[in-house]
Amino acid sequence: MTENTTPAENSSEQKFNSKVSINMLTNIVRTLLMALFGFLMVPYYIDSLGLAAYAIIPLATSIVAYILAVTDSLGDAFARFIAVSIQHGEFDEANRNYSTASIGLLRIILMATPICILVSILSPYIFQVGDTAFFEVQTFFVMVLLSSLAMSYSAGMDSVFVGYNRLYATYISKTVYIVLQVGIVLAWFFLFGPSLWSIGMSYVVATTVMLVMMFLWKRRICPDIRLSRRSYSPEHMKDMGALGLWTTVSELGILMFIQASLVLSNIYLGAESQGEFSIVANMISMINTATTSITVVFVPLAYRKYAEEDYEGLVKVVNLFTKFVGLVMVFPIAFILVFMEQIIGLWLGDGYEAIYDLLMVMLPVQVAVTTVRVLMNVPLVYLKMETVAKITLVIGLFNVAITFLSLNFTDLGLIGISMCWVISMLMIKVGFYPIYAARITGQKLRCYYIPLVYSHVLFLVTVTIMYVLNMYFTMPMSWLAVLSSFFIGFMVYVVASLKVMFDKEEKTMILDYFPGFVKRYIGRYLGVD
């Protein structure tokens, strides 16, 4: 407790921080389910629909990402205003922000609906869809795109949960969404046979249930925040939209990376090759989702520190989470890299050896991608998104350009696409974000580069140890062996990392994000009273 902090304020801070562990736990459960269903459903879809038809699914989700760039980016911008007003205790302002954001989002969604319908109609004429019936592809696209648009409306409610640090409400709702979506697909395939139409319908039903759940959560957690037409302010919408504009441009730039690579692989190399690239992209996406499951709990803490004008505390939290996330994610990346043959063989079976080379190229850069994930939120907190948007868009266009050149003037195929993506990732994740975060927070460059060094050194050590172990002890080809080896190794790795790689102050900060009964047990081991 600092000299200027009252006991009541300190208690409020501890209560707020203690929600981090609940948020993280529910998000980890959601992420594990996503990973489990992702691993199981990919081979299931390929066996049921064929590789060419399966390739349509990630292609549709890539198009969804482009369309949702506007609504999701605005949602992030709205969350910043709503969360800060809640932390200031300005509930009239919070209601104005919430109502303006929700009504503004609804109008944008209605304007985007005709675009989604048009894209759905044209989809089988733009992309290679194999022998799949055009009408089935069009119906699938329209249901996925429109349900995803409807899901984006939840951004307003999610912003309120960010302000109260009750993100578990969002994660529980999204967990139900995942389970329901997969359940509907399995039931339909079993009763009526496989079809893209049933997958699209699962999106529609699951999205509806999720929105209802989030609305009920909002009424329970924060009944004082209400949607009111009278609170809508066109002028305030312009203010929030100014931040949202640059956030949107940044999102569009991000979509110029692996999503653009998916589209180009379909156009130039065909549905089969794009299907193979989609499998790797799916694995990369799951790693990024797992990273986000940890980093997202940092966002409410950042807004609270910013609202309190505790900029020194904000830098400490940013640095701690950057280091923590990087060290935690090193092990899964190294494990997949070393044991990819066992994982791919068990997951998809034989005939996917080409994927090994793609993973060898694309996985190592994920160490940097996951480590700097926290830093990507810093410009949004400080209202400094313009530079981020411009740099991201430029590097994204650079990725598209060199991928286009690779496909037209070399015979590298998917390897060329992967190499272009890696170059672009290094430019933005290693070359830009640490430098820009240091600049806007007033820190020296080493502040955010040191965690990157830690992550990469630990990655090399971990990979080396795993390769040596793999030389003398061949892992059996069974899920039990793979999963047990992963979880046992991961637990040993995390415990050792916390013990060795963090100083006493950092350990104390980490413990502040756990409930009291957990602190006592973990604190003893870490040597923190």
Image (tube, grey):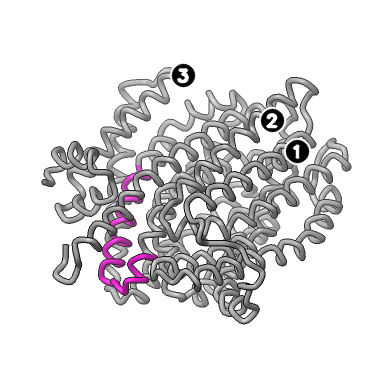
Classify residue 275 as left or right of residue 3: right
Please give the label number shown on residue 184.
2
Q: Is residue 507 above or below residue 9?
A: above
Would you name the residue on which mark 3 appears?
477
Classify residue 92 as left or right of residue 165: right
Residue 38: in magenta span: no
Mark pair 1, 3: CA separation: 36 Å
- Binning the other alpha carbons within 10 Å of mark 3 as few (below 14), some (14 to 19) or many (20 upward) gives few
Q: Earlier in the sequence, mark 3 or mark 2?
A: 2
Quadrant in the picture for the N terminus: bottom left
Please give the label number shown on residue 17.
none
Span colored in magenta: 303-330
Q: Nearer the viewer, residue 61 or 125?
A: 61
Q: Secondary structure at mark 3?
A: loop
Q: Is residue 302 above or below residue 484?
A: below
Q: Earlier in the sequence, mark 1 or mark 3?
A: 1
x%, y% of residue 122?
85, 53
Amino acid beneath label 1: Met
Q: Is residue 208 above or below residue 300?
A: above
Residue at horizontal 57 percent and vertical 37 percent from the top = 176
x%, y% of residue 225?
52, 62
x%, y% of residue 179?
59, 33
- Binning the other alpha carbons within 10 Å of mark 2 as few (below 14), some (14 to 19) or many (20 upward) gives some
Please give the label number shown on residue 201.
1
Residue at horizontal 66 percent and vertical 61 percent from the top = 405
